[in-house]
Image (spheres, rainbow, N blue to C red):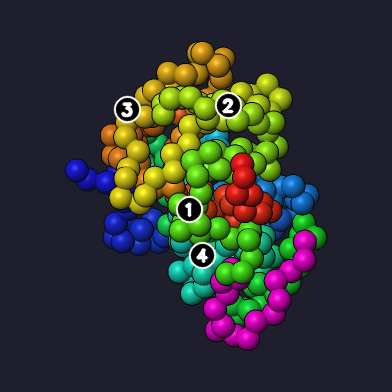
Amino acid sequence: MKDSTRISDETDDKQLNRSPPQTDVVRSLERLSRFIRYGPSAVTNQTYAVYYRAHELAVSFPKWGTSIRDSDGVVLRLESTQKLKRKLEQACDQQLSYRQVHRTLDKLAEIGGEAVWLTDTATTGQSKHCLHVHIPSTYSVSEIFSTESSFGEQALSQLPSGELLSPPTSDSRFWKLETLLTLHPRQFEHLVARLWDELGYKTTVTKRSGDDGVDVIATAEEQRVVIQTKRNRPSSQVTSRVVQRTIGTIPQFRADQAIVVTTSEFSPSARKSEKASNGLVQLVNGDMLLGMLATADIEKPKEDI
């Protein structure tokens, strides 16, 4: 089956040739840079995706763990940040944490960089795809990461040109899949709850129940979310049956949305269930989970949870 989210290089090239004049891109980015002012909590609570549409740039703020629609009804999901991260890493030849992705976008707005997004309407469900990230050749990689961001956090240390930038392995904030797999399932539930606490929710870990029960209940203002956790090995995909059963708990808990969080991946049928739910369920795979943990200051849970 053809992957509807895959965009060929030929399509990329054609779309990039239609990009607006560089001056217009820079002007739009400068306006966004002046308009957006981030507080410290925004680094962990929100992420943003800059995308190209109708010869202008726009910005949206999807909250972690939810999906929203822009003015055209296009769903912006966490995958957008995943794809943008990969494009930035390709453009910079660097390994980046998600915190560094935020800083890089902020810096790009200052130096006239460009993040171009394509709206894919060929499939049933519209989605955003990051086509291209351009960093002006007059700026070295070290310059992009060596100045303070607009939200005032401590900047990254200056690096010699060409030196790779990667998260320190000794820093407990940067989780690895191997570490997550060593956790007891109950510890993993508490970790997910703490992560949603960091995102501004008030969470409750439910009592031990059946494998298909709700593990965490998260509330924020008038929103109520039920979360199912699956600490699986990479080879063990979460099936559509789990997704459907999690959706089925929404009425019982009077929730607005269901989220399934796993250390592995979801089966194709599970992804279809997510798309068919029209935002009722959000799937967070292992890569996305590690990215969320990279932006949150969470120490490894104690052994006696």
Q: Is residue 219 visible?
A: yes
Foreground residue, 35 or 267? 267
Comparing labels 2 and 4, the label whose residue is closer to the camera: 2
Residue 137 sits in which quadrant? bottom right
User: What's the residue at 35%, 38% (across, down)?
Assistant: 238
Q: CA distance from mark 3 to mark 2?
A: 21 Å
What kind of element bears circle 3? helix
Q: Which residue is mark 2?
A: 206
Q: Amino acid at mark 2?
A: Thr
- Circle 4 packing at 10 Å, graded few (<14), some (14-19), many (20+), is many
Q: Which residue is mark 1?
A: 182
**Mark 1 near mark 3, Cβ–Cβ under 8 Å?**
no
Comparing labels 3 and 2, the label whose residue is closer to the camera: 2
Q: CA distance from mark 1 to mark 3?
A: 25 Å
User: What's the residue at 50%, 57% (across, down)?
Assistant: 179
Residue interval drawn in magenta: 153-168
Q: Position of residue 176 (x, y in %)?
A: 50, 59
Q: Which residue is mark 3?
A: 241
Foreground residue, 202 or 8? 202
Q: Position of residue 212 (x, y in %)?
A: 41, 26
Q: Which mark is residue 88?
A: 4
Main secondary structure of the magenta stretch: loop
Image quarter in which the C terminus is found: top right
User: What's the residue at 66%, 54% (across, down)?
Assistant: 299
Q: CA distance from mark 3 to mark 4?
A: 35 Å
Residue 2 falls left or right of residue 239: left
Image quarter in which the N terminus is found: top left
Foreground residue, 195 or 125? 195
